[in-house]
Image (cartoon, rainbow, N blue to C red):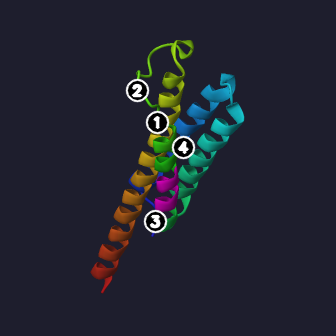
Amino acid sequence: MRKNNLTGTIPSLWGFLFIGFAIVQLNDQDPFIWISIYSFAALICFYSGIKRIHSLILMLFASLFAAGCIYLWPPVYEGIAMPMDYSSNIELAREAMGLLICAVAMINLIVLNWIFMRRIKMAKKRVH
């Protein structure tokens, strides 16, 4: 069964979002790390839009992104809107929220997989 607009377009939208995130990281203090992370997330999303990725693999990625978010979460949350030179906690919060968005995207891909597989099962029932 061919992927439809829902299960094909939404992963691509996530992928383009992560490419945008990677581009913004070009002027960061540690661009290689964050460009790699966001590019990897974009690659997963684009691939998921073309071909199904097993949900367990997506759960692993979601867990890793969520663990990174928890690890980087600042000891004192001071928001994300202030300039970076105001406090290092702001940069940590931004990085943690970026990983949280990656985790949410992976969970969204899991839900889209579930929808796709459910449609396949319903189509098979109609044939029989």
Which comes before the other along the chain, label 1 or label 4? Answer: 4
Residue at left offset 67%, top offset 42%: 36
Q: Which mark is residue 55?
A: 3
- The CA span between labels 2 and 4 is 28 Å
Label 4 is placed on what type of residue? Gly
Q: Residue furthest right?
A: 32
- What secondary structure is found at the residue carrying circle 3? helix
Per the rendered image, the range of residues in magenta is 58-64
Which comes before the other along the chain, label 1 or label 3? Answer: 3
Label 2 is placed on what type of residue? Tyr
Mark 1 surroundings within 10 Å by alpha-carbon count, few (fewer than 14), some (14 through 19), many (20 or more): some
Q: Is residue 11 visible?
A: no
- The CA span between labels 2 and 1 is 8 Å
Q: Which mark is residue 73?
A: 1
- What secondary structure is found at the residue carrying circle 4? helix
Which comes before the other along the chain, label 3 or label 4? Answer: 4
Indicate the position of residue 18 as horizontal and vertical percent values.
Answer: 55, 38
Relative to 74, 19 lies left or right: right
Q: Choose mark 1 or mark 3, whichever is in front.
A: 1
Q: Residue furthest bottom?
A: 128
Label 3 is placed on what type of residue? Ser
Judge by depth and name the residue closer to the eye, 116 or 102.
Answer: 102
Residue 63 located within the stretch drawn in magenta: yes
Q: Write down the residue under mark 4.
A: 15
Q: Write down the residue under mark 2.
A: 77
Judge by depth and name the residue closer to the eye, 85 or 37.
Answer: 85
Q: Are marks 2 and 1 in contact (CB under 8 Å)?
A: yes
Which comes before the other along the chain, label 2 or label 4? Answer: 4
